[in-house]
Image (cartoon, rainbow, N blue to C red):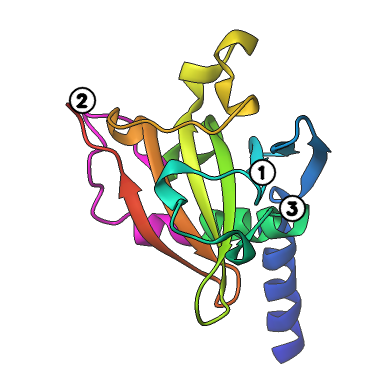
Amino acid sequence: MIKNLILAFSCVLSFSAYGQKVTEYRQTSKYLTYVKGDSFEGSSISKDFVLPFMSDIPKEFRFTPTAQDIETAELLLSSQLRAVNAKLEHQGKNIGPVIHDNLPKYARQYYGYITATGERIVLVSNLWGANYKTEQEKSWKRGAVVVMDGGSNYWQIKANLTTHKLFDLFVNGSA
């Protein structure tokens, strides 16, 4: 009985992790690395790039998320986002997409930093893919994208790679 449970649990873990594998990871500029997986696409932002909303984090506390870091963040997203998003703030009905139901439809940007206690965090910034389908509109491939409104078309969340927890979900408001 216990062997069967362990086998079933192992299979579930294997299947849930399958869609979270990075299949392409290549540097496209000094500050960006293109990342693609079976169910996600995005850019890893270099530790050398100073983001406006993270400018207070010193360079020695920033890191460039690796393929493995991104796989871990994606696994946390796929397994924990629904629970973290229980309030459905700024989403659903006529407001915008429910983010946990549409996760594969978002392009992502990944920013890494280390807390004062040594925890490795990946901030995942999500951009509604329908707005970024053509090559001309894929600005996330050329640089960091910061959007102020747009509801659930644009949202951010932090993935703690040390504790394996998602936290600080922020869904943009609507003007």
Looking at numbered disc 3 in the image, what kind of residue is underneath it?
Answer: Tyr
Mark 2 or mark 1, which is nearer the start of the sequence? Answer: 1
In the picture of the structure, the residue carrying the numbered disc 1 is: 44
Q: How many marks?
A: 3
Residue 90, given in percent of the width and then of the height, sits at 23, 39
The quarter of the rendered structure image containing the C terminus is: top left
Could one spot residue 79 in this view of the protein? Answer: yes
Residue 138, given in percent of the width and then of the height, sits at 59, 19
Q: Are marks 3 and 2 in contact (CB under 8 Å)?
A: no
Residue 137, given in percent of the width and then of the height, sits at 55, 13
Residue depth check, mark 1 versus mark 3: number of the one nearer the observer: 1
Q: CA distance from mark 3 to mark 2?
A: 33 Å
Question: Which label belongs to residue 135?
Answer: none
Give the magenta-colored segment's residue range.
Answer: 80-99
In the picture of the structure, the residue carrying the numbered disc 2 is: 94
Q: CA distance from mark 1 to mark 2?
A: 32 Å
Mark 2 or mark 3, which is nearer the start of the sequence? Answer: 3
Local secondary structure at mark 1: strand
Residue depth check, mark 1 versus mark 2: number of the one nearer the observer: 1
In the picture of the structure, the residue carrying the numbered disc 3 is: 18
- The residue nearer to you, when weighing 159 against 142, is 142
Looking at numbered disc 2 in the image, what kind of residue is underneath it?
Answer: Asn
